[in-house]
Amino acid sequence: MAYVAVKGGERAIDAAHDWLARERRGDPAIPALGIRQVEEQLGRAVDRVMAEGSCHDTGLAALAIKQAQGDLIEAAFLLRAYRTTLPRFASSLPVETAAMVIRRRISAIYKDLPGGQVLGPTYDYTHRLLDFSLAAERLDETEMRPPARPTDTGRRAMPRVMDLLDREGLMGAEQPGDAAPADLTREPLSFPAGRDVRLQALARGDEGFLLALGYSTQRGYGNTHPFVGEIRVGAVAVEIVPPELGFAIEIGRIDLTECEMVNQFGGSKTEPAQFTRGYGLCFGHAERKAMGMALVDRSMRASEFGEDVTAPAQDIEFVLSHSDNIEATGFVEHLKLPHYVDFQSELETIRRMRRTAGEDAAPEGEAP
Amino acid sequence: MSGYNFAYLDEQTKRMIRRAILKAVAIPGHQVPFGAREMPLPYGWGTGGIQVTAAILGQDDVLKVIDQGADDTTNAVSIRRFFARTAGVATTTRTTKATVIQTRHRIPETPLRADQILVYQVPLPEPLAKLEPSRAETRQMHALAEYGLMHVKLYEDIARFGHIAISYDYPVMVNGRYLMSPSPIPAFDTPKMHRMPALQLFGAGREKRIYAVPPFTSVRPLDFDDHPFRLIRAPHPCALCGARDSYLDEVLTDDRGGRMFVCSDTDYCASRRDIAEAAGEAA
Amino acid sequence: MNAPLLDAPLLEARDLRLSFGSIRALDGVNATLWPGEVLAIVGESGSGKTTLLNVLSGRARPDMGQAIYRDPEGAAHDVHAMPAPQLRALHRSDWGFVHQNPRDALRMGVSAGGNVGERLMAQGARHYGSIRDTAIDRLRQVEISADRIDDLPRTFSGGMLQRLQIARTLATHPRLVFMDEPTGGLDVSVQARLLDLIRSLVARLGIAVVLVTHDIAVARLLAGRILVMRHGQVVETGLTDQVLDDPQHPYTQLLVSSVLQA
């Protein structure tokens, strides 16, 4: 009898998990993927998982990617679920991106500037042609090449472009705050949400969502007239102040991507015109994410600058409620769970409605 | 399970959740924001209920987990295993034996007692969300108890269909003050909430809200005097146990329109069959 | 119906002041509204008349001064000192607000009956049949046929939408209705019919109205008294016919003559 179909849940789950494990491994004749290989050779994937998983650990991110068969949202979820069980023993001091050891630094608003433009490792000017030499199962061409001449780029003084504009009084002043920033991982999101909360949510937010929203502002849904003031990628020191020491010590270095957008000036009869700023910062090398974040950050400041809130990217509640892909994927995918109790209610209701409609319609069809 | 605290969450987090629960009990039906943690199960799959259960579970508790009324649906199995693994508590499928029952979409048919706690998994805690998407706005509506909009929705149903067309997640007034989502239980179950002896706790993990109905609290479905709330149930007896008072699942048996109706509450159905069997043997 | 307390004003403005930057939108405005009377506030755009309406109705807060409302029991309330729930309750019951654009007030996805019934339900009405009866009655009052009760507002013409907004406002027997250019944006013939309707409704139901209009003709037709504003100040006030037939202030003279020439 068909009723057995809903029985045997436990065995079915076990069997499904076994199958998944076999599928993840793939053909056993092919060597298994090493965590170090993922870490070294799929760095952009590792970076994305660390950013959306809100946890900087390249090894764990690589493990999550392997375990999730390269499903990056699933991997970020694994990393987050692990992260939430970790004790918190300190909060870092704000990182100083002006002191970043630079791998890449570009500005779209000055041809040359102190510290210079540093292209660094970028896909920007590559021709998107499949490189079949990579498909050959032998050492990559690049591995044969001698390492590039070491440069002093990373150590050169690289003042932030925004600080240069700031000095001229052209940038709108940001209010410095002494208050500890809010923490979404401990406190629930509530509205109105301050910029600290917004930036944290965006930094953890889904790259695709931020990309699409940022793109929408460029196409006229809440235009902010952005220029890339600066993008910098490199390593910064992370410092904490252990209470027993009372002074800052460096606990390590992390790679970051920072994007500062220079946006349309406001100003009125009483206030002089100034540029405004959109800010993006995320783990690893993730320019697309940082740029999307900076565009959306600026858009969400619309009411702060007296602009009308008309576009999705300007609607703080809309953006923040939907930027988290772990929440989104859970709720979208929960539709796969059984809903037959509710559906049964809907069936009975719709049958009743159809009966009612039938009764109402019937007399009209009959001759008086 | 080694490497994890009893019932997975650390004690600090459990305390935070218990504070939210206490506040929720003190203000029946009011949604209390809480710092929901990422759980190793996906959002929307019961993370709110799991966190509430984890926060109230003690070593001596006996846990029952149901989804769609059944103990053996995949998600119920997964959650029961999670607590068996992380808390090592006894589990049961018998409603009468459980001290804590976590549920998705149903209230057991067997009336609950004052020494039991019912934990609901809630996908969307905001009953006004379908009418007003902004949570900033709905918060204000709750604060001012402005629920006219919800009645407009019911009015529109009657004007269009001749009756209220909400068949599950039926909006209720709690203690005469707060409009509350009972979670997506069928409207059939809604009256069971009214003055229930057991404590009812509601956890929404993704939306980060906890709310509660204390024991013996008034829970009334919204309706009109001349269009009172009505139960919706398939007009059949259960094909397995013959019950005429239980909520039924419709099971398709072939592709030619064959179907049968059976209790959605598997424990209720099995208990009735056990009793009938015992009576049959005794006779 | 409540017997209007004719010996006390329903609503009073006492030295209201409100500035937006360097612009004085209200510069010491005093005004009085008596039960059952229609008071027109006229002036060019930018004169402060809409700001005055918003401040009187509690939708905007003045920098200084008070707006005093007298409830049916005769108790006086400072509109801006009222707790938000009380003010909102007032707006849903004793007061009404008719916007120039009916789409600002109506729920376009809710039937005409639901729109009228919402105010009743917000006040606790829980009998579907009687809510519907009241809705039909209010629709009739504004000359909307009862068989349109289940239609969505988007199927209505501009004039009908405005009448539906008025029906919605009338649902709870308000004593005081604020109207912001209620006939603005309508065709002339539609305007005339609506003005006629408003005039007869107000007279029949004994509702007091604060009416903002830039149209002197509308003020003449509806209002017993008139208040002429310029640069945030009241330059002239009195009985409508008197002020319009024999304007004293040069600005009022200009306003009246410009209409006559048009």
Image: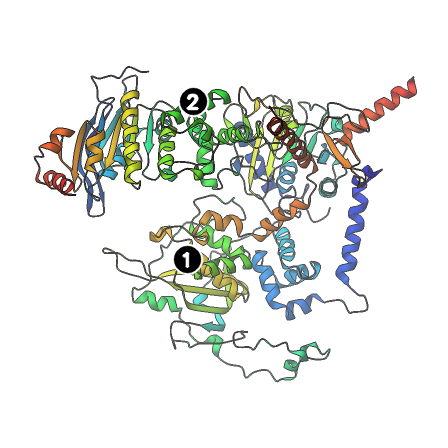
Residue at left offset 65%, top offset 71%: A41
Is residue A113 depicted above or below B144 in this figure? Answer: below
Q: In the rendered view of the protein, which quadrant contains the N terminus of chain A?
A: top right
The spot of residue B4 in percent (x, y) is 68, 47
Residue at left offset 14%, top offset 40%: C260
Q: Which residue is mark 2?
A: C134
Q: Amino acid at mark 1?
A: Arg
Q: In the rendered view of the protein, which quadrant contains the C terminus of chain A?
A: top right
Disc ID at residue B206: none
**Residue B198 appears in the picture as rendered:** yes
Residue at left offset 65%, top offset 82%: A141
The spot of residue C58 in percent (x, y) is 30, 33
Residue sitting nearer the eye, C166 or A279: C166
B17 with respect to C158 (left or right):
right
The spot of residue B193 in percent (x, y) is 62, 25
Q: Which residue is mark 1?
A: A298
Query: Splitting the image into 4 quarters, where does residue C68 fall?
Result: top left
A143 with respect to C58 (left or right):
right
Whether callout 2 and callout 1 share a subunit is answered: no
B25 with respect to C44 (left or right):
right
